[in-house]
Amino acid sequence: MPHLELLKLSKINSRKLWDDKLPGLSYMQNLRRLTIDKCCNIAYAFSFSVAREFVNLKYLAISNCQMLEEIFVSDGKFGSLPLSQNQFSNNEVVPNTSELILNSKDVTMLCNGQLNDELIYTVTNLRLRCFHDESDKFPSDFLQRFVNLKKLKVTCSSFTYILNGSECDGHSETIMKLRILVLVELDNLEFICEENSEVQPILQNIETLSVHRCSRLKNIIQSSVLFENLEELLVVNCAGLENILKSSTAISLQKLRKLYIDGCEKIEEIVASDDDNDTSELVFMKLEYLWLKKLPSLRSFCKGRHGFKFPLLKSLFVIDCPVMETFSHGVLDAAKLKKGVYPHVLDPRLIPNGTTQQSVYNHHDILV
């Protein structure tokens, strides 16, 4: 199998997955993605001599291996001590891995020094999952090992918050490189970052924020947090949300291009006004796509009196929002709006300027 690039090993009962003396030109050298799942008898994943063969590996996922004690061990009988950190370079063991999936046990192992920090300097995509103990805190200190981290995905865990300024002080330069933050099925998550914590340097470069099925989350962006470079915001099936952001925060979203809100039962408005009497105009300078879908409690984009300006808005979808009263109670300027879909919005007065009732009907075929 000289051209094998993808390999998944599942439910293998053997205590060892590999021959520790693989030939130098084995099929491992072309492998790019490796998944090890439900191999319940293995005590370790690789010896160093095997790991050195994975010269093109980009993706490594290990899960549900109950007996696993170490990812890498020194050659020879299992139980020998791992090589000390100065006995091998970061180019010798899985040198090109760019994506890594870790659970709570994995992180504990790595934090205990069983893997050289420099070995994972190439990782740009990290997924943390299955931190089910409610006493678990988000492992902020652990992230300093991933010096080039661009994407962080956190799934199926019991964290109540993700980022805290005081916990991130020691490695803010690392986290500042984050471009994508994805949060999925975090049932205890109450806030992404603590209110009034010093997290601005951590979040300032995030371009995509995606939040799915986080039922206790009350809002996405606190008033004290500015996502200055955020381009895409996706929020799906977050049952506890009442709004997405405050009006005082909206002014920081000058680079936002896409806003997608879907399946959030309690949301009554997208932007909550800090002052009901404030009539100032809020401008989303680069917003091109706005999707509001399956929001049974949504009454308007903002219940306050703010005016809204969308200079570049091209597409507006309001789908299955049956109690929506009006898009905005203030002045609305969306001069470049070309297409939109508004099921349940039968009164033409509720449709923003720039989209005619006829164009509404013309675009029913693009519903998804």
Image (cartoon, rainbow, N blue to C red):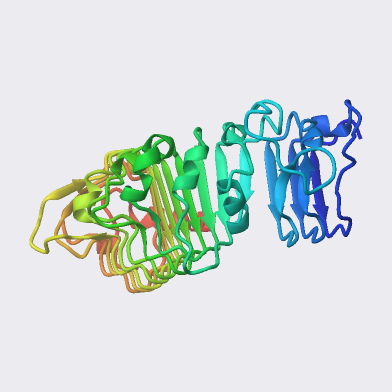
The reply to whether residue 67 is in sight is: yes
Residue 148, relative to residue 240: is it above or below? above
Is 26 in front, or is 74?
74
How many numbered discs, if any? 0
Locate residue 356, reporting x and y percent: 33, 53
Picture quarter with the N terminus: top right
Locate residue 211, reporting x and y percent: 45, 57
Q: In the picture, residue 175 is in which quadrant?
A: top left
Is 69 in front, or is 290?
69
Locate residue 368, reporting x and y percent: 54, 58
Is 71 in front, or is 238?
71
Residue reaching furthest to the left: 277
Identify the residue at horizontal 53%, vertical 68% (top origin).
133
Locate residue 317, reporting x and y percent: 41, 56
The reply to whether residue 317 is in sight is: no
Q: In the picture, residue 4 is in which quadrant?
A: top right
Q: Is residue 297 left or right of residue 248?
A: right
Q: Is residue 302 left or right of residue 49?
A: left
Identify the residue at horizontal 90%, vertical 41% (top origin).
19
Is 214 in front, or is 176?
176
Residue 23, relative to residue 316: is it above or below? above
Identify the residue at horizontal 48%, vertical 69% (top origin).
134
Identify the residue at horizontal 48%, vertical 58% (top origin).
364
